[in-house]
Structures are given as C-alpha cells and as structure tokens.
Image (cartoon, helix red, strand yellow):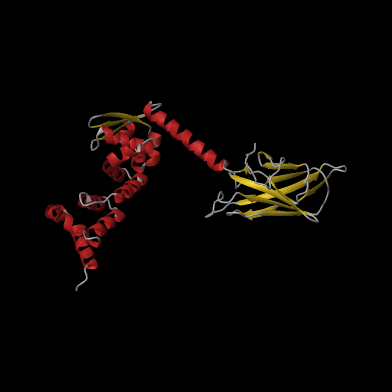
Amino acid sequence: MSLGGGGGGLSGPDSRVETISRLAQWRIDTFGPCSYRRSDPFKLGIWNWYLSVEKSRSICVRLFPEPGRVAKEQPPLARFVLRVSWAGPPRRSSVSPVVEHLLRSSEDFVWQVDVMSHGRFTIDATESSSLIWPSEGMVLNIASKSTLGCLSRMLAESIHADVTITITDGVLKAHKAILAACSPVFESMFVHDLKEKESSTININDMCLESCSALLGFIYGTIKQEQFWKHRLSLLAAANKYAITDIKNCCEESLLEDINSSNVLERLHVAWLYQLEKLKKGCLTYLFVFGKIYDVRDEMHSFFHHADRELMLEMFQEVLSVWKPI
C-alpha cells in the first residue's frame, strides 16, 4: 500500500515508497547527478510520511511526518529502526539503533549511514511501537458499535426479555441484568424478596409509555437526541428515583444549556427538587448576576407562593451577594 503524490523537483521516477503493515520500503536505483532525494508521501500508522536521502561523504536518511498531520496537544511516541541495503556485489547492509521521538508538527528521524556504496540501494523503515496505529481505537469503536447493535436488537425484539414494565398507558419488555447493572434500585428489586423479583414485573405509574421508552433507550444506548430533549425532565425524575447517575448528570448538563426567561423559574425549581447544584447556580446567576429577574417579575409572585423557604433564602442571599450600594 502506498500513497501517490508529487515531491516537486526533489522526487524522481523511483520516489515511490511501498508500505505493508509496519514496514516502509524505498528502493532507489541511483542518485544520478543529484545529492538529495525525497520520496513521495506514504502512509504508515495514521499519518503521511516522507523519506529523504542526502549524499556527501556518508548518507543521511531522514524520516518525517507530513506537517499539520500530527497530533499537537498529546503527540504519541513513535519508534523506528532503519536498515539500508546495497544490492552489491558484495551485498551489504547497515542497521541503525532504534530512534524514538515524541511526534510533533514536523519532528525528524535522522540516521547517519557510514557505509558508502554506489548503485541501487533499499531503505527499510520499520515502526516498532503501537502508539501511532489506530488499531486500539478502531477495535474499541467496532466493539462499541457491535455491543450497541446487540442491545438495540435485544430491546426492540424483546430477545430473552425476562421482566415486564407496566406503565399507565402500556407495557414494555426489558432485561433484569441490564436494568440491575445501571440502577442499584432495580438491582435491589431483583436481589431481595420483593414483589418485582417474584412476579418479574415493575410498575412505573409516574411515566407515560413514550417517556419510559426514552428511559430504556438511554439505558440500552439507543436513544435519539430529539427523544432525549423531549423527555429530559421525565428522564431526570426517573434518574433521581432509580439512582441512575449518568442520566441525572446528562440531564443537568442539558438543562443548563438553554436557560431563558421563559423556563428559568421552572429550572430553578427542578434544580432544588433534585439537588442539582450546577443547574441551581446557573439559574441564580441568570436571574441576579445577569439581571433577568426583571423579565420574570410577573411570574415571581406565583413562584414564591410555592417555593421552598430554604430556596427563597438562597435567592435572597444571591441578591445580597451581587447588590452593591451606590
């Protein structure tokens, strides 16, 4: 496998580099009148590379990544071994020690080859680590997609479903092991001698069929973004009830993203109800630091009529913290 592409006037008819697995091989028939040669780009790992050769009293071989194609914030470590072989006769070769670099935008691997010969020669560059290869991420990505596909089928087709969830307007099938793995409350139902264990039935009378389907979709990894947005308040209530931390955190982060004057009081009540400190702080900041309390003054009477006294105290303290006398 190799990549085509020009190397400008520095490339020649034999500037192509062949690659297979972790080995890149460049065969050069002759330098000709030039003292410097550069290869076409080739791919090794997840980046494009170049090889160059400069001839003087000895041979200097450089291997360098294509600028702009290497991770800059956390550049991985790459290790290369170089072997230069002359066709002969007599056939000779020079093998370098391992050269190791932390890859950055244009870090060069440099080898000085003391053996000098005329005619055709071959450069083998072998990568000896696994850190520039996408295999781990690729495997994890494929495994994750495969798992989600299996879970999706299990839920959609009720494959070996062993628990029935009854809702106010319907029935859903699920799996005890999956519910127990995500929620200590569900796990307790199936471990202890409770009615859910005996009947293999869970009654959820505070959710509709659609919002409970969204809950199962989140648990099984099949929920769609629009489904989450539509049911996130119901999901938050269920996550609090069944102690599903991931759903609770996700809902809080989402509710923080679109606070406005039409929903800030409702969000503040929700934050207080479910002990969501980040959401509560966000709502108080929106109201008092950004001065949006004036936009909701008509709704404040009803809010204070139903709000918890401790929440009202926190709101008053927030007013005092931002108020500065003239």
Residue 226, relative to residue 110: is it above or below?
A: above
Residue 134 relative to residue 253: left or right: right
> Percent from the top left, x then y, of residue 173?
34, 29
Residue 31 relative to residue 247: left or right: right
Tally of numbered tags: 0
179 and 211: which one is in front?
Answer: 211
- At horizontal 31% and vertical 36% (from top left) the residue drawn is 214
- At horizontal 73% and vertical 54% (from top left) the residue drawn is 111
Q: Quadrant of residue 180?
A: top left
> Percent from the top left, x then y, of residue 168?
22, 32
Q: Quadrant of residue 187?
A: top left
**Furthest residue toward right:** 90
- At horizontal 28% and vertical 39% (from top left) the residue drawn is 230
Q: Quadrant of residue 278?
A: bottom left
**Furthest residue toward bottom:** 326
> Percent from the top left, x then y, of residue 87?
82, 41
